[in-house]
Image (spheres, rainbow, N blue to C red):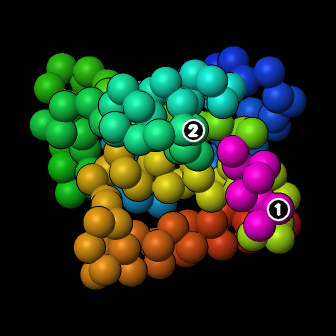
Amino acid sequence: MSIEIANESGVDVDTDAVLAVARHALDEMGVNPLAELSVLLVDIEYMTELNHRWMGGDGPTDVLAFPMDEGSVDHGPGESAPAGGEPALLGDIVLCPEVAAKQATTADHTTADELHLLTVHGVLHLLGYDHAEPEEEREMFMLQARLLASWRSTRTR
């Protein structure tokens, strides 16, 4: 699993933990081990620009997910590796640590916890999960909670 991470946010972030939770979520979801993922941490100004340009939103958001072509994504162990052993390009997750820090205060947990949650949330979006409808939201958020709990349990062993 190839996961690239770039911290351009100006905020000190434990990028190893962000990588680890992303890798855990992808492994647990049975994603092809040749898959490639990019994680970018940005400042509020750039996240505001991305949110406006791609989502039509005002102000910064916490996480954006930009999936690659759905046809290139291996959603699980039932599918074979891409032709010729080429890696599947899952897409990009963009996180904003400053927004995560504000949300963490509201949620009464650490900024690191919030970034881990947002990373898993972004991975699930790349894999086609959404939360636009109540049933979709229930499914996605239950899966998100399960993945975070299983990842945390591996870190405390």
Residue situated furthest front in the rendering: 58
Question: What count of labels does the image hold?
Answer: 2
* 154, above or below 32, in the image: below
Determine whether 69 is above or below 4 in the image: below
Nearest to the observer: residue 81 or residue 9:
9
- Given the image, on which type of amino acid does mark 2 rest? Pro
Residue 105: mark in rendering: 1
Q: Position of residue 132 (x, y in %)?
A: 29, 66
Element type at mark 2: loop
Which mark is on residue 50?
Answer: none
- Amino acid bearing label 1: Thr
Q: Is residue 47 above or below residue 60?
A: above
First to last magenta residue range? 99-106
The spot of residue 149 in percent (x, y) is: 66, 72
Q: Identify the residue at image location x=51%, y=67%.
A: 144
Judge whether residue 63 can be spotted in this image.
yes
**Closer to the N terminus: mark 1 or mark 2?**
2
Q: Secondary structure at mark 1?
A: helix
* Mark 2: few/some/many CA within 10 Å (<14, 14-19, 20+): some
- For label 1, the crowd category at 10 Å Cα-Cα, with few meaning under 14, some 14 to 19 and many 20 or more, is few
In the depicted structure, whether residue 104 falls above or below residue 44? below
Q: The C terminus appears in which quarter of the rendering?
A: bottom right
Residue 90 pos. (x, y %):
34, 34
By secondary structure, the bulk of the magenta-drawn segment is best described as helix
Task: Name the residue carrying label 2.
Answer: 60
Q: Is residue 1 at all visible to an observer of this figure?
A: no
Does residue 132 appear to the left or right of 25 in the view shown? Answer: left
- State the image coordinates of residue 60 (x, y, percent, origin top left): 57, 38
Image-quadrant location for residue 154: bottom right
What residue lies at 57% left-to-right and 73% top-to-bottom? Answer: 145
